[in-house]
């Protein structure tokens, strides 16, 4: 059964996609820690990040770096935090989280619940800087 991320990649589930190429996709987290919280996902469905082929892993980090630079331009923050947790969805993914304080990347704190319109506005802001 395909992961929820594969279903997003295949456009079976809507998402606010902010960047994409032939191997990776970046989209807003629907339950973000902060505004602009973005997921970087390889299109190849692999559960554990360290099971990725070395070149794919390296290229995913370079893709994430490009997205992070645009996020930093788009969302007011001190820096973009990076986290790999990978327990909630069995498909490798990297979290990019705009940060102004260490607590902004604390995954045990309550998540935001932005409306569809708020997510779309955030995505449009970010996409405008690509």
Image: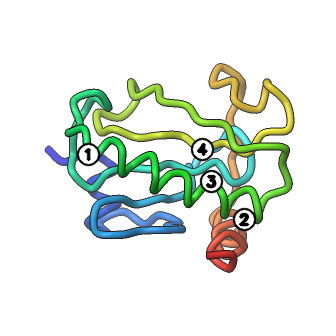
Taking the image as shown, residue 124 lies to the left or right of residue 101, namely left
- Pointer 2 and pointer 1: residues touching (CB < 8 Å)? no
Please report contact status of discs 4 and 3: CB closer than 8 Å, yes or no.
yes
State the image coordinates of residue 56 (x, y, percent, origin top left). Answer: 27, 47
Question: What residue did someone put label 2 on?
Answer: 118
Marking on residue 55: 1
Label 2 crowding class (10 Å Cα cut-off): few <14, some 14-19, many 20+?
Answer: few
Q: Earlier in the sequence, mark 4 or mark 3?
A: 3
In this view, the residue in front, 43 or 58, is: 58
> Where residue 32 appears, x then y in whole percent?
64, 43
Q: Is residue 32 above or below residue 9?
A: above
Q: Which is more toward the observer, 17 or 113?
A: 17
Most distant residue in the bottom direction: 128
Residue 58 percent location from the top left of the image: 36, 44
Looking at this view, is 23 or 35 the one in front?
Answer: 23
Q: Mark 3 points at which residue?
A: 68
On residue 96, the disc is: 4
3D distance between C-alphas at marks 2 and 1: 35 Å
Q: Which of marks 4 and 1 is nearer the N terminus?
A: 1
Sequence-wise, which precedes: disc 3 or disc 1?
1
22, 5: nearer the viewer: 22
In this picture, residue 105 sits left or right of residue 90: right
Q: How far apart are marks 4 and 3 (CA)?
A: 7 Å
Does 88 appear above or below 65? above
Mark closer to the observer (2, 3): 3
**Which mark lies nearer to you, 2 or 4?**
4
Q: Residue at x 72, y 73 (%)?
A: 125
User: Residues under labels 4 and 1: Cα distance?
Assistant: 20 Å
Q: Nearer the viewer, mark 4 or mark 1?
A: 1
């Amino acid at each position: 059964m395909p992961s929820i991320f594969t279903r997003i990649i295949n456009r079976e589930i809507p998402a606010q996609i902010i960047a994409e190429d032939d191997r990776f996709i970046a989209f807003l987290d629907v339950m973000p820690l902060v505004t602009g919280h973005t997921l970087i996902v390889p299109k190849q469905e692999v559960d554990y990040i360290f099971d990725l082929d070395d070149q794919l892993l390296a290229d995913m980090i370079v893709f994430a770096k490009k997205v992070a630079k645009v996020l930093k331009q788009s969302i007011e923050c001190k820096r973009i935090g990076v986290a790999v947790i990978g327990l909630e969805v069995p498909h490798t993914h990297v979290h990019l989280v705009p940060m102004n304080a260490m607590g902004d990347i604390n995954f045990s704190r309550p998540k935001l619940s932005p409306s569809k319109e708020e997510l779309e506005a955030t995505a449009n802001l970010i996409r405008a800087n690509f």
